[in-house]
Amino acid sequence: MDSPTKPRGGRRKAADAPMVWRMGKLHVNLTVNGEARELVVEPGTTLLEALRDGLGLTGTKKSCDRGECGACTVHRDGRRILACMTLAAMQGRRHITTIEGLERNGELHPLQQAFIEHDGFQCGFCTPGQIMSGAAVIEEARAGWPSAATADVKRPFGLADLSKAEIRERMSGNLCRCACYPNIVDALADTAKRG
Amino acid sequence: MRVLALARPEDPAQAIAAHAADPALAFIAGGTDLLGLIKDHAALPERLLDINHLPGMSRIETLPDGALRIGALVRMSDLAAHSDVRARFPVIAEALLFAASGQLRNMASIGGNIMQRTRCAYFRDEDDLACNKRRPGSGCSARHGVNRNHAIFGWSDACVATSPSDLAVALCALDAAVIVRGPSGERSIAFFDFHRLPGDMPERDNVLERGDLIVAIEVSASAPARGSHYLKVRDRQSYEFALVSAAAVVELDDRRIRSARLALGGVAHKPWRLAQAEAALRGAALDDAEDLRSAISLSFAAARPLEHNSFKVELAKRAALRALQIAGARA
Amino acid sequence: MNSVGQAISRADGPLKVAGKARYTADIAIEGAAHAAIVPSVIANGRTVSIDTAAAEQAAGVIAVFTWRNMPRLNPTPKPWSHLHPHGQGYLPLQDDRIHYSGQPIALVVATTLAQATHAGTLIQVEYEEDKPVVFGPDSVADAFDPPQFLWPVNSSVGDAERGLAAAAVKVERTYTTADRHHNQMEPHASTAVWRADGSLTLYETTQHIFGARELVSIVLGLPPEKITVISKFVGGGFGGKAYVWPHTLLAAVAARQVGRPVRLQLTRANMYSMVGHQAATIQTISLGAEKTGRLTAIRHQNISPTSPFDGYIEYAALGTRSLWPATGGISTMHRIVRVNRNTPTAMRSPHEAVGHFALESAMDELAYATGTDPVALRLLNDTEIDPHSGRPFSTRALGECLTQGAARFGWDQRSPEPRSMRDGALLTGQGVAAAIYTHWRWPSKARVTLRSDGTALVEVGSHEIGGGTYTVMQQIAADVLGMALDKVTVALGDTRLPASHASIGSATMANAGASVMLAAKAARDKAIELAVTGKDAPLAGAAAEDILVSDGVLSAAPSNVSATYAELLARNGLQRLEGEGAYDPVEEANGTKAIFSFSAVFAEVRVDPDLGTARVSRLVGAYDAGRIINPKTARSQAIGGMIWGVGQALLEQSETDPTTGRFVNRNFSGYLVPANADIPELDALFVGGFDEEASPLGAKGLGELTAVSVAPAIANAVYHATGRRIRDLPITIEKLL
């Protein structure tokens, strides 16, 4: 069964208008790593499963599948999220970036390069999630977001305030069992400093 | 996951009517709690209503009387980063920032946050253990099981679970209101009344009925909340639910407490207000730690720890005291 | 141009940071079905009935297996032992017995994982339940003297009892450690693909491809040459992927039965019952000493749980046999208890990491009892002779670990009294602990091939589990060959490669590395021979030992004639030139020297006296792991090990439900591994030198050593901070309130 979504841009419909139930195989149009893609998923398919199984983007990892480890971190419309805890069918028109899309013109993202230089990984399994999270951490700091490590949330925050203690707190949603945390922090601090 | 159908209502009335009519339907916003429950078979909705596009529910506003109105679809990270919230209600920003992770805060909605279900390991177990919250009448595995993380206040033999939301503790201390729209219109529920104690119906976490949709949270500006703080105690430094937490909102006259509002997390099936302590704290000197401590202790006469969590009684007193002192220093 | 000893960035780094390293579950297999395990919810009893009708009817379901229709498997070798590569002797779906909670009682195979998982929930099971035995005061009374499976179970040198009786100062204490789970970030996965010729390819998350092949061969009755096991990248092992666990067998059999490839990946919750764990310990230590602190007697006894069917021993007192000498005597003893759980297994760092918590905590207690500085006490008791075997140590730089570590840490600034140091409202404490770690010597083969394009290929049936195997093997071969690093490619993780050992026991560098070195030498020597005696030999007349190779160019000073590998091969009409390496060392126990790694760990903690929270603020680890091949990857292993120690000390415990015998906290929100915010700046220094007994490379084991004695250093620091001696890990809030 294939039930299209209601086109966006239409105005609110009346309360008594029937809702469109989508079931069976759903088609979802979105942008992944800069390319328009169509996913064919079931209502309960997570974004993680759709990326891995549907698009073959296996850089995004399934580790806990419960939002408790960060291995599936991707960006949605520029923000870091967990692909295991959102449904693929809810991503229509969204822009998703995975680790495979972080390179620009065949060049590694500076943070990817910094992870290599600082040895920010061992087995490498959590690494895509760490890097996607880390890239977003720098943007969040630039946007002035405080964290639990911020001494006074009332004060404005800026990229220059992104201390190692701040990085540690902000990266705590990405577990690493090989435990490369200090190197990950160094890679981020270095990248943030270089702007 | 066993979800059969998905729809995206564009009007709250439509969503409310569908939810009221269909017991196998659930709202989904961020999904960060619901999807975990579905994967663990602790929730079995067949149909999901994606409410993320409902209009007017994603705004953070200051109302004419100075009250803060937080749309139910506002994301945790946006609320925590909001400069007005940080300045006027630091307890809210802190409760959010000490919760979950950066990724989850970008996803989870405020309405969903306060609806989070307990982290009791027996409730969440994907193999469907005895749990009255999950399967009424099946028993409570935690009552005589591993219950370090469980309640010390207000539990029943049917359920000893705790409520996991940090934000809810802060909102409870702030005397916030939950704005709910249901089949018969909109109503405001005092935050303290929103969550329930387990009693003999632990399957119900809160007072919402079928068809009820949280549209916003309102925090009154009648008392200043600049002097507020959220303190979270946990084994891990970050990314963990609270073992015990304390939210304090304090107003001072000189160095004496004019009013103190205290709520605890991690100790009960709902955010736990320390009403007796609050009354006794009126007029107390902020710098007299012993006096503050005695006042706080009044609220702990009702504490009934379980086999593995008796330490929470003392820990919660100390957390409340420190939250009170830090909030007072800001007031 | 030697790369060994240089801080080289990882060869597989560009793949790993780009998400292009393919782990087992990332490998797409055409037509693969997906399997989900249905676990038992009871821990003891049997299944009376298993109704699979609804599951079989469910959408996408291909097959449902229970003990009734699962083919019978060959038994694994007896007696059960870790000399064989099976995690546990009890095989899945073979009878109606239930021995542990989470035991597989059915396997659903379906087109998609979601279908398999959903169908699993439709299976109705009726149990006959017996009360499970759990590890605790009641069951410990039934502890027994187990059969040996690695080292002797008990040991006695001298007369420890008499030494204790005569001791001027005695410390007698019981220390306990919690059950823990590996929790690798990558869940175990197995994809089984049968070919038309009856051969089997297993894509496997394993630290031991050849072991997996051996065990699957035995259990399935399939000749090993018909089995290929592939494991190119492993997302963390830590011992938990070293042995074959039931899911691998289930995937292989299910794939054969349904006639298509089957992938079985454990869920996070599965990882608490389908694969092993580190068993809890109850350890009793008695130290006798002179008033100076010189040890006169040591007695160390351990009790740990095992499964109803296998006799896993956590050899907690192993390190105690060799770390400190005692003039009177040393005795050690291990007992085990059968409880309803699956078989425990090796977990970083098996035996030593749990045992050193007791030994090195007791040493700290002795330091306070004798009024001796904890570093000085250890220096006083240092030795050059292994107290257990009487052999001299090959190398033992423990003294340097202690003194250099102390200097780096600033130990001389420590005020010895407990509760005497503060940082504002927080109590500060500093502690130290020393460690000894087993060195394994195992055979390994490797092949190094010089290719006509001037590059080289290293082939060794080893594994990349995070230790940097692709990188260090490249370094070793490149140096021996005299070739640039980027000209050397390394192939790992495939049983079609030369056979190597398990990547466990911190043994890969010293053993697999040695075989690569030998293979590279063999290839180089063949090339040199060609240069001297081959067709149009450019270096004819030169003595082979005078020939140098640098950047792929062979030359013999003072002549300025030279030839590249590529030219030599071309000149002799060769596409390739292969060197074989077979490293076959004498087992450590049979050598003339006692070979161990050593360390000293210095910890600083800050304790909030009101809230009971202890956080590590500083760690310095000083290591004697012999020669360090790559300081960059070695440092990463070291900080990783330290963080494992932080987890052991402060966070990690698998809690057992007292009634149902089930591990309760089966996920990352319940089982707490350290997060980034738990970890301060860490400092690792390497003080060891070349150990020729340990390996031709001079390297001793490192990876596991680094997780040993972090916990006692932290516990000793907590004592120093608070005056409270915590003898039960982890040190959680309630213990410090």
Image (spheres, grey):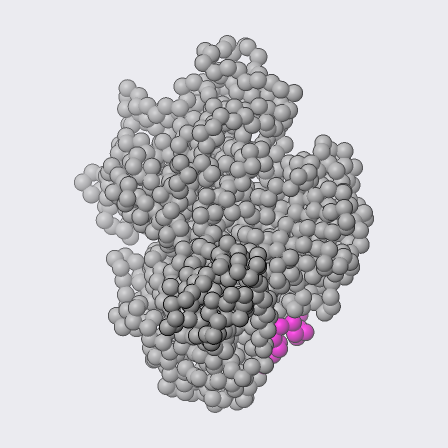
- Residue C420 in which image quadrant: bottom left
Front residue (pair A134, B269): A134
Q: Residue at x 43, y 74 (%)?
A: C546
Name, please, the residue furthest toward the left: B254
Residue B327, position in %: x, y? 28, 42
Residue B125, position in %: x, y? 60, 44
Front residue (pair C725, A140): A140
Q: Residue at x 47, y 52 (%)?
A: C12
Whether residue C163 appears in this view of the structure is yes
The quarter of the picture where the N terminus of chain C appears is: bottom left
Q: Which residues are magenta?
A: C141-155
Q: Residue at x 29, y 52 (%)?
A: B290
Front residue (pair C408, C475): C475
Front residue (pair B18, A78): A78
Whether residue C36 appears in this view of the structure is no
Residue C659, position in %: x, y? 64, 54
Q: Is residue B287 rendered to the left or right of residue B51?
A: left
Residue C705, position in %: x, y? 47, 68
